[in-house]
Image (cartoon, grey):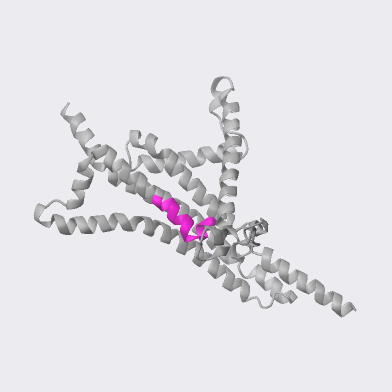
């Protein structure tokens, strides 16, 4: 009887460890409990209804919306803190909070992204594209780090989610180029020499079309490999049904968690930086024209 109880407890520990230890390397998600995600509703799951290649990837949809709601809620709290600061009298309104509040955190992010954009764009363009770049950075950053929460699968671990973000960037920077430079934006695809225009046009167009895939695949591969390495380290600990194996599954991935923190931060920065560079390249001709026009005056 005692042996049976011990075996039952070990099985419970094994399942709990598999699902909750090292959330960044587990395939379990709390959102699988939503009707229609894992268990069919009306004869099929959400993934089947959307004709996804892997029906289990439907879990990224509620995860993404949940993270968006969390970001909006935190941003709302930060805004209320900023409003309270603005309401102060004298120079006190310019002082940061004494502790690390949401307001301070968002002001640091805003200053960081603003400095990054001012290094590549004019002040006018920074004002125009800051909402996009700032939102992408915050979302990718939060999405990457959500993988460290037990029971969450980061949306950036899904290629479709990343491609949606990259496609948004693709549409925006091409629209920016066309709206700022008109047909001149298309003309630069032909290169500087007219007799080489066909070859340049093919190369430049291919380069433009590759950018969304490059953005999405780069982010996906880095997050996927990071989680894969953590999963391998966890499995090296041995069977989770044993105490040594459970301890090994917790201890061995710890060094890789620190690497994961770095990867998550860097990839959010790289995604934002490449977005700024693509926009800067698209509007560069317009900026140069304005500069020459102003210099002539």
Q: Residue at x 46, y 64 (%)?
A: 221
Report x, y in % for residue 278.
33, 48
Estimate the x, y position of residue 290 in percent, counting from the top left: 23, 33
User: Is 5 left, or right, of 176 in this rendering?
Assistant: right
Residue at the front extreme of this rendering: 42
Q: Quadrant of the N terminus?
A: bottom right
Task: Specify the farthest residue to the right.
Answer: 1
- Residue 122 location (% of width, % of height): 32, 36
* Circle count: 0
Residue nearest the observer in this picture, 14 or 243: 14
Does residue 172 appear to the left or right of 185 in the view shown? Answer: right
Q: Is residue 164 magenta?
A: yes
Left or right: 52 with respect to 191? right
Magenta span: predominant SS is helix
Residue at 51 percent of width and 48 percent of height? 139
- 152 over 131 or under it: above or below: below
The x and y percentages for residue 125 are 34, 36
- In this view, the residue farthest toward the top is 89
Query: In which quadrant will I find the C terminus?
Result: top left
At horizontal 72% and vertical 69% (from top left) the residue drawn is 15
Left or right: where 134 falls relative to 210:
right
Can residue 11 be seen in this snapshot? Answer: yes
The foreground one among 245 and 163 is 163
User: Residue 144 colored magenta?
Assistant: no
The image quarter in which residue 19 lies: bottom right
Residue at (18, 34) in percent of width and height: 292
Identify whether 60 is placed above or below 96: below
Q: Nearer the viewer, residue 192 or 90?
A: 192
Work out which residue is located at the far left of the displayed protein and give it. Answer: 195
Q: Is residue 151 visible?
A: no
Magenta stretch in the rendered image: 155-167
């Amino acid at each position: 009887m005692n042996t049976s109880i011990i075996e039952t407890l070990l099985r419970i520990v094994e399942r709990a460890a598999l699902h909750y230890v090292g959330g960044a390397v587990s395939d379990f998600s709390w959102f699988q409990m939503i009707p229609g995600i894992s268990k069919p509703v009306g004869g099929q799951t959400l993934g089947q209804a959307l004709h996804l290649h892997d029906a289990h990837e439907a879990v990224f949809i509620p995860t993404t919306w949940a993270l968006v709601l969390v970001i909006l809620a935190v941003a709302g709290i930060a805004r209320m803190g900023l409003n309270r600061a603005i309401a102060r009298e004298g120079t006190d309104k310019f002082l940061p909070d004494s502790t690390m509040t949401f307001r301070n955190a968002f002001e640091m992010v805003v200053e960081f992204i603003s400095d990054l954009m001012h290094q590549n764009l004019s002040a006018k363009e920074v004002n125009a594209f800051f909402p996009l770049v700032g939102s992408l950075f915050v979302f990718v950053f939060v999405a990457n780090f959500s993988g460290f929460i037990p029971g969450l699968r980061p949306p950036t671990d899904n290629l479709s989610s990343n491609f949606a973000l990259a496609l948004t960037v693709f549409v925006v920077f091409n629209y920016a180029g066309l709206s700022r430079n008109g047909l001149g934006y298309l003309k630069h695809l032909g290169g500087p020499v007219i007799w080489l225009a066909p070859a340049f046009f093919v190369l430049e167009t291919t380069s433009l079309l590759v950018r969304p895939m490059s953005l999405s695949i780069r982010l996906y591969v880095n997050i996927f490999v990071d989680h894969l390495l953590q999963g391998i380290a966890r499995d090296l600990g041995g069977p989770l049904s044993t105490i040594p194996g459970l301890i090994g599954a917790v201890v061995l991935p710890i060094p890789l968690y620190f690497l994961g923190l770095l990867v998550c931060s860097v990839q959010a920065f790289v995604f934002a930086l490449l977005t700024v560079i693509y926009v800067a390249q698209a509007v560069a001709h317009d900026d140069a024209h304005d500069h020459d026009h102003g210099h002539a005056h």
